[in-house]
């Protein structure tokens, strides 16, 4: 069951996303000493990251991972890491996906997750986006990677929108203590409807973590 929260616009949804991250990481730090958070790319979450950066947090006790990354050169504007580094405070600890390492990079990242989180790795919070085609992370329709249930990190089988992607997979995502999507804009309405209906043809709807929250603006759910 996905809990839906609807907001009057993208700014309010982004603010709610930042609040959710703050609340979750502070609880994780109280309970276990460190918070482990995975963040997605795309343009939608930029205001959320900027709002998060304003907060007074024990940044040294938060470790951020990437949900996915494009196979692009370091510093490229299409790299999700480029925007995370620009948005978050310099003292924020980010574990970048080693796309420069090629195919072995997925195994390197999986090993790093296990080293920091234990085995099996369990993330406290995963932030996801939702594509118009229902993709989430870099789990896209038709990719054989959708049937990957062994490796926690893998490369997409084919290029998607011009680039191959490294991505967290269902096994790791579904172990997370909390998953939330931040979705805005009328063009996402069909995907939102499919996600809420549990349409298994959409990669996003195949997630079954214990707790899932959808933060959406009114246009994404058709009420604005």
Image: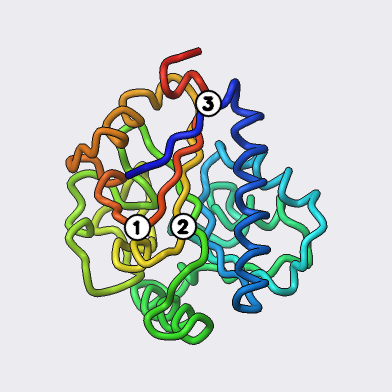
Figure quadrant of residue 148:
bottom left
Residue that numbered label 2 is attached to: 178
Residue 10, relative to residue 96: is it above or below?
above
| Tag shown at residue 139 | none
In the depicted view, which residue is nearer to us: 25 or 181? Answer: 25
Q: Residue at x 39, y 72 (%)?
A: 102
Q: Are marks 2 and 1 in contact (CB under 8 Å)?
A: yes
Please report whichever mark, 2 or 1, sits nearer to the chain's N-terminal start.
2
Residue 216, relative to residue 52: is it above or below?
above
Residue 101 at what x, y percent from top left? 44, 75
Q: Secondary structure at mark 1?
A: loop
Please report whichever mark, 3 or 2, sits nearer to the chain's N-terminal start.
2
Mark 3 nearby-residue class (10 Å; few <14, some 14–19, many ≥20): many
Q: Secondary structure at mark 2?
A: loop
Residue that numbered label 3 is attached to: 217
- Which of discs 3 and 1 lies nearer the camera? The answer is 1
Q: Residue at x 38, y 51 (%)?
A: 163
In the depicted view, which residue is nearer to us: 132 or 80? Answer: 132
Figure quadrant of residue 201:
top left
Residue 160 at what x, y percent from top left? 32, 46
Residue 8, relative to residue 105: is it above or below?
above
Q: Quadrant of the N terminus?
A: top left
């Amino acid at each position: 069951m996905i809990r839906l929260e609807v907001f009057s616009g993208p700014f309010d949804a982004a603010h709610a996303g930042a609040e959710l991250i703050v609340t979750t990481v502070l609880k994780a730090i109280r309970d276990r000493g460190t918070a482990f958070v995975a963040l997605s790319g795309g343009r939608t979450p930029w205001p959320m990251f900027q709002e998060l950066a304003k907060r007074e947090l024990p940044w040294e006790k938060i470790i951020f991972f990437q949900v996915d990354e494009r196979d692009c050169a370091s510093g490229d504007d299409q790299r999700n890491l480029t925007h995370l580094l620009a948005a978050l405070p310099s003292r924020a600890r980010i574990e970048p996906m080693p796309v420069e390492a090629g195919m072995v990079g997925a195994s390197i990242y999986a090993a790093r997750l296990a080293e920091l989180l234990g085995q099996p790795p369990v993330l406290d919070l995963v932030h996801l986006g939702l594509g118009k085609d229902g993709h989430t992370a870099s789990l896209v329709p038709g990719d054989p990677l959708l049937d990957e249930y062994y490796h926690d990190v893998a490369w997409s089988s084919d290029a998607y929108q011009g680039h191959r992607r490294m991505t967290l997979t269902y096994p790791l995502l579904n172990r997370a203590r909390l998953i939330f999507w931040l979705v805005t804009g009328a063009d996402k309405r069909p995907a939102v409807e499919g996600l809420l209906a549990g349409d298994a043809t959409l990669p996003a709807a195949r997630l079954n973590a214990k707790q899932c929250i959808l933060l959406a603006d009114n246009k994404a759910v058709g009420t604005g």
